Image (spheres, helix red, strand yellow):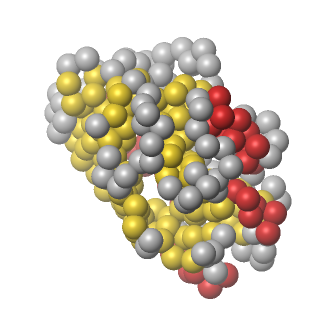
Amino acid sequence: MHDAYLVHAMVMHKRLRPTVHRFRYPVFAIRVRLSALERLNGFFLGVNRWRPLSLRTRDYGPRDGSPLLPWIRRQLADIGLCDQGEVWLQTFPRVFGYAFNPVSFWYCHDTAGQLIAVLADVNNTFGDYHGYLLSKRDGTPIRSGETLVCRKILHVSPFCKVEGLYRFRLAEKPDRMLMRIDYHDDAGELINTSLSGELQPLTSARALLAILRQPLLTVGIVWRIVWQAFRLWRKHVPFLGKFPPPATPLSHGQEGSS
């Protein structure tokens, strides 16, 4: 098993009402083993240092630059889950120093290698963030294709209220991933979102090719958010403005699973 993977992925977003609005575009992400972070520094990828692709620990979890693995293990222990297995972080890297991550996923395993929790680490464009720590009610492993549910707490879009819930459905294979997030407000299903892609071991050659193909990856993410917001406004979707940030930085998504 490798310590880092490159994820060639596709983002899909579809709003169902009051008008249908859909877009789809390619991205790339990296998935890294947190226990191996110190070994990942190389020519193209750096951890807490500048490289063409980089990760900064202050962008995740407690946002204070402290080590990430002890932090997430404390969160797992707090809800009675195994805290000694491997944890993988999938995220959009900083590209030439710049990053914006709408959501990063922490895949948390037990000592037998079974997935027991997923942390959806969400940022909005206003500088607010919140972590949704998802697990099954009984603490048993999360099987591919299962759905986990949590209440929406963080304001993300000025075209949505802070109400309702998210349904996360993940499917994992050795070389492919899928994370589907369906948002339901008080009137029912509103937005379908998915991130799907192929995992390849991260090498210098693959990192260089990814940069050459999408040198403005993270700038493009912000630009697309702005552009799609403009398109929604043009379609007369009600603009609701900004809601206050959440009172706590982390919530445990154990309201239900199916």
Q: Where is residue 120 in the image (x, y as percent from the top left)?
A: 51, 40
Depicted 244 relative to depicted 52: above or below? above
* Number of marks in picture: 0
* Residue at screen point 60% across, 14% down: 247
Q: Position of residue 76 (x, y in %)?
A: 62, 37
Does the image show residue 93?
no
Q: Residue furthest bottom?
A: 205
Depicted 179 relative to depicted 140: above or below? below
Observer-nearest of 34 and 62: 34
Q: Quick one: quadrant of the C terminus?
A: top left
Q: Quick one: quadrant of the N terminus?
A: bottom right
* Residue at screen point 77% across, 77% down: 43
* Residue at screen point 35% across, 28% down: 256
Does the image show residue 179?
yes
Observer-nearest of 105 and 69: 69
Observer-nearest of 257 and 220: 257
Observer-nearest of 248 and 230: 248
Quarter holding residue 36: bottom right
Q: Where is residue 73 in the image (x, y as percent from the top left)?
A: 69, 41
Q: Where is residue 169 in the image (x, y as percent from the top left)?
A: 34, 46
* Residue at screen point 47% across, 22% down: 153
